[in-house]
Image (cartoon, rainbow, N blue to C red):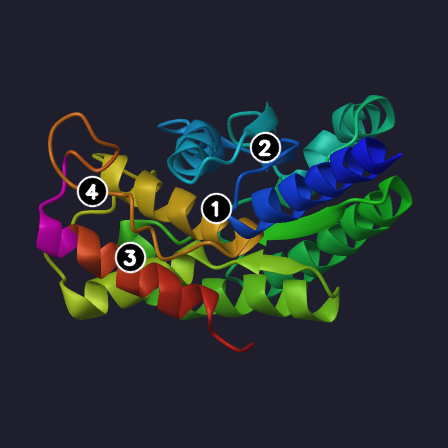
Amino acid sequence: MKLCFLFLWMIGWYCSTGEVLGKSLHPIRILFVGNSLTYTNDIPALVKKLGELDGINIEYKTIVGADYGLEDHLSEGTVQNALAVSKYDFVVIQQGPSALPASQINLMSVVQQYKMLCDHAKTKLAVYMVWPSKSRLFDLDQVIYSYSNAAKKNDVIVCPAGLAWKKTWAMDSSISLYGPDGFHPDTVGSLLSAMVIYGTLTRKYMFEKLESGEGTLSKYLNKRSLNILKKTTKEAIETKW
């Protein structure tokens, strides 16, 4: 009887300690829904690699398409089918910048539709805030407002990558985040976006184990630039909307 009690106590201690140390006993399962702003440089895979640094196992599925809006995925039924056959901890959704008034209304409406789906599936919805094209950088504040407002009004999570981009440029305008086409992220922009998504969902955004240098996730960054990304990620995530 004593041995049985000791065994059960050890199991309880192991489980609680594993949670405290951030070692996930079960994987975090994420469904990513969006377009090329999600699949360029495979941001979901970067989120998974960030988890590995913390000993967190992340499993993910992507439902993406070039030039797709969130309504397009709903029309095809792919999101509904994914939620019907598998259990996810988070659904992370993204579409274009949605800066113009009509686009803001559309984003608000489609987030509401996804919220209903996620509530029914008992999973959490997160909105991945993007950015405008370089030629329309003047729209950045409206993009930030559009995504944060849609998240706030629908009571869902916001992953404020666009805000982190803005804060990064405010600290060092020479840090490259855009790719050659002036819209999709380069490797640094993708890493920053992944840091924001990962940090928002797990609440682990100090990134002590993320280092610069060859062979690392941030091999294109020097130590100073990486520290800026860490700082702006933290500031963006801790923003009160």
Q: Say which of marks 1 and 2 sits in front.
A: 1
Toward the bottom, the furthest residue is 240
- The residue that appears at 56% across and 51% down in the rendered structure is 201
Q: Nearer the viewer, residue 12 or 53?
A: 12
Considering the image in quadrants, where does the N terminus appear?
top right
Q: Position of residue 121 (x, y in %)?
A: 86, 40
Q: Nearer the viewer, residue 185 or 15?
A: 15
Q: Say which of marks 4 and 3 sits in front.
A: 4
Q: Disc 3 versus disc 1: distance between alpha carbons?
A: 12 Å
Q: Say which of marks 3 and 2 sits in front.
A: 3
Judging by the rendered image, the residue that carries numbered circle 3 is: 230
Q: Disc 4 versus disc 1: distance between alpha carbons?
A: 16 Å
Q: Nearer the viewer, residue 172 or 60?
A: 60
Which labelled disc corresponds to residue 198? 1
Q: Disc 1 versus disc 2: distance between alpha carbons?
A: 23 Å
Q: Is residue 199 shown above or below 29? A: below
